[in-house]
Image (spheres, rainbow, N blue to C red):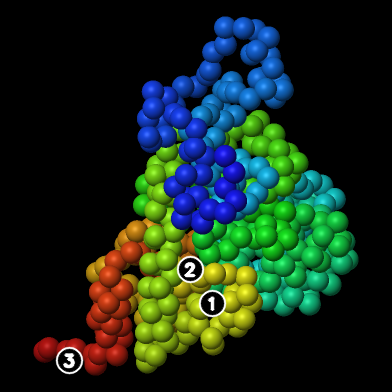
Amino acid sequence: MGYSGLQKGTVSVWGGETERFYKGATTVPVVQSVAFSYGDPDEWYEVATGRAEGYIYSRNTNPTVRVLEEKIRALEGAEAATSFSTGMGAISNTLWALLGPGKRVVTIKDTYGGASRLFLDFLPAYGIEVTLCETGNHEEMEAEIARGCDLVYLETPTNPTLKVVDVARLSLAARTAGAVTVVDNTFATPINQNPLSLGADLVIHSATKFLCGHSDAMGGLLCGKAALVQKVYGFREINGASLQGDPAYMILRGMKTLELRIERQNASAMQVAQYLLAHPAVENVFYPGLPSHHGYEVASTQMSGYGGVLSFALKGGYDAVKAFLPKLRLVHLAASLGSVSTLAGPPRTTSHVELTEEQRALLGIPESLIRYSVGIENVQDLIADLGQALAVLSAPPTPEVR
């Protein structure tokens, strides 16, 4: 069955699930088998060599995982998709599969901390040239791409400062230079943004986040041009960062409500951002849905919604962060995002814990910053919670009792 003409909410439910499951089950069965048997050696050989559809070994893929891969393929409008045990598995396997000694990658400074470590430490150690450009400086990126490169890696909106890059513009520059464009679409989700339709070659998701939506399963997904996906799949097949049936099932279950959750989180994050922007204890708010945001115009062009994550810097530096965070009641202070419950924390313990304070400063991440991932709670309750916690920062000091 094709999915043309269907809205994303419908594809979130039915993508990959149009065939009749075992014994007529209406929910995707969890297949936990490591291996799959064949009575006919010739048929087995055909499947093992990729000449026929089927399953051989769950390190490669399995029926439950295949449904998830088909669902993200349909949602992103891709030719093919594959999966990984984690989001970082998706990022690292993609980079290692497509790059090698003597290759060059052009990227932005504001990538997720794990990806930043790859660009700052791991890839250069293997003879891969990495050029970090100022996020949002499209002229600089175009010039660096034109110098010659093999891969352009983008993340938009970025983690954790929510900067925005023009996917269509930079994909065109990459295509002109003969480079592959890879976009991390985790923050936006396929509900808000489809990079392949803007000219990108590959799209990455940390499925642990919004796709799963419940903070109870980990996974990574890659989709895009079939030849590129197959190349990364071949690397992952041997590298072994495979997604298994149980987490795949939980991510699939979460994706049924993806559009509903994202619509709620889009609206709530906008209200929270507007509230924080007007608060005297807040120095700056980073959310692409605010007209004051540097990337607002680009975001309004390439996104249909601005997402459920924002960040804000408090006046008073990290001391203010330490005073404020413990006062929040309707939030988990934890290193993740995209859940039905609100999650918050500073980059030094969440997105960029792998980096030093100096490296975070180099990337333009202040120590006073807080990433706030809005859940599906009532937004007025969240705003009231933020208000009572922020009041601590403006309250007069308690007189010392002698």
Between 234 and 298, the one nearer to me in the picture: 298
Q: Position of residue 274 (x, y in %)?
A: 41, 84
Report the amino acid beneath label 1. Answer: Pro
Q: Which residue is mark 2?
A: 307
User: Are the residues tagged 1 and 2 within 8 Å (C-beta)?
Assistant: yes
Residue labelled with disc 1 = 288
User: Upstream in the sequence, badge 1 or badge 2?
Assistant: 1
Residue in the image at 78% along x and 75% along y: 140
Q: CA distance from mark 3 to mark 2?
A: 43 Å
Cα separation between marks 1 and 2 = 8 Å
Secondary structure of the residue carrying tag 1 is: loop
Query: Where residue 1 sits in the image (x, y, percent)?
Result: 57, 39
Marks 3 and 1 in Cβ contact (< 8 Å): no
Q: Residue furthest front?
A: 5
Viewer-proximal residue, 181 or 2?
2
Q: Secondary structure at mark 3?
A: loop
Where residue 161 sits, quadrant-wise, is: bottom right
Query: Three-letter amino acid code at disc 2?
Result: Gly
The dot on residue 399 is 3
The answer to whether residue 274 is visible is yes
* Residue 229 x/y as whole percent: 69, 42
